[in-house]
Amino acid sequence: MNFLHKAILAGVSIALLSGSALAQSAPVAPIKPKAFTNFGVTRTDNYYWLNQPTNAEVLKYLNAENAYFDKQMAGAQATQKKLVAEIKGRIKQEDASVPYRDNGYYYYTRFEFGSEYPIYCRKKGRTIEMEEVLLNGDEMGTGRPYFQIGDWAVSDNNQLLAFTADTVSRRLYTLRFKNLLTGQFFSERIANTGGEVVWAADNKTVFLHQKGCDYPAALPGVPTYGWHRPQNRRRGIPGARQYLQRACEPFKVAEIRWHRVG
């Protein structure tokens, strides 16, 4: 099911479900209380057991919910297809962002006709013949039920690309690297990151936020550091690339620090 289908389901479901359909029994999740005590306060979550996406019982319940939904929405399929076609007809499917210049290259994102994911590109000149594809979202997302590129960053020597991608739809991003001189992806990966990645000025160090405290080596000789939400060094501002912004935002209070990395 693609994004446009998901976007219209809520609207058409209320309009198209009949009284007899609503009267059919829906699956009910069992209540399994689990108590949590923090700061002297105890709270109970009756459905905490549902947070295990690979658990057999959880999968059985979710499949039952999906089957119930498909049965209830069977009469709306024609309307869904009509609405998707109308929405797509109003969208410019072949489009590109405005290029911006950074460290000798123009960077931009573009979509091809009929594609589901963006293509991240750069070029030194202004003609399409000089285009270099950094990440092809369509190729990387083919055959996956979910795919999203979280963040990407090019090293200061323009030779290495670090990027994150989520393939499970749980904001769990895997950090990977690409050699921009050869076009080859490195096999090393770091799982369960927050999605952000930043290069230091030495072209050897990356900063990331990982959900956990063990940081395996990303590349031979490339150290990694785990911070909460490292931000890209400012582009286009003289001297600003020497500093890394670190943000910590628990709830409604934010703390921002700058660290010299160049």
Image: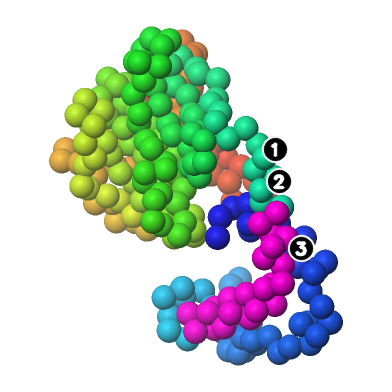
Q: Position of residue 66 (x, y in %)?
A: 58, 76
Q: Name which of mark 3 and mark 1 comes first in the sequence.
A: 3
| Residue closest to the eye, 128 or 59 | 128
Q: Residues within 10 Å of mark 3 (few under 14, many from 20)?
A: some
Of the 4 image quadrants, the one containing the C terminus is top left
Q: Amino acid at mark 2?
A: Glu
Residue wearing tag 1 = 90
Residue occupied by mark 2 = 86
> Left or right of 68: which side holds 16?
right
Whole-percent x and y of residue 163?
A: 37, 39
84 or 55: nearer the viewer: 84
* Callouts 2 and 1 close, C-beta under 8 Å: yes
* Res 22 seen here: yes
On screen, 54 above or below 224?
below
Residue 185: percent from left, percent from top: 24, 40
Contact check, label 3 and label 2, Cβ < 8 Å? no
Calculate the distance from the C-alpha at mark 2 to the C-alpha at mark 1: 7 Å
Mark 1 secondary-structure assignment: loop
Q: Quadrant of the N terminus?
A: bottom right
Where is residue 162 shown, x and y percent of the image? 33, 36
Q: Which residue is mark 3?
A: 12
Q: Main secondary structure of the magenta part?
A: helix
The residue depicted at 37 percent of the width and 36 percent of the height is 135
Which residue does the image show at 30% across and 44% down from the upper left? 176
Could you tell me which residue is drawn at 49 percent across and 34 percent down?
A: 112
Q: Nearer the viewer, residue 261 or 163?
A: 163
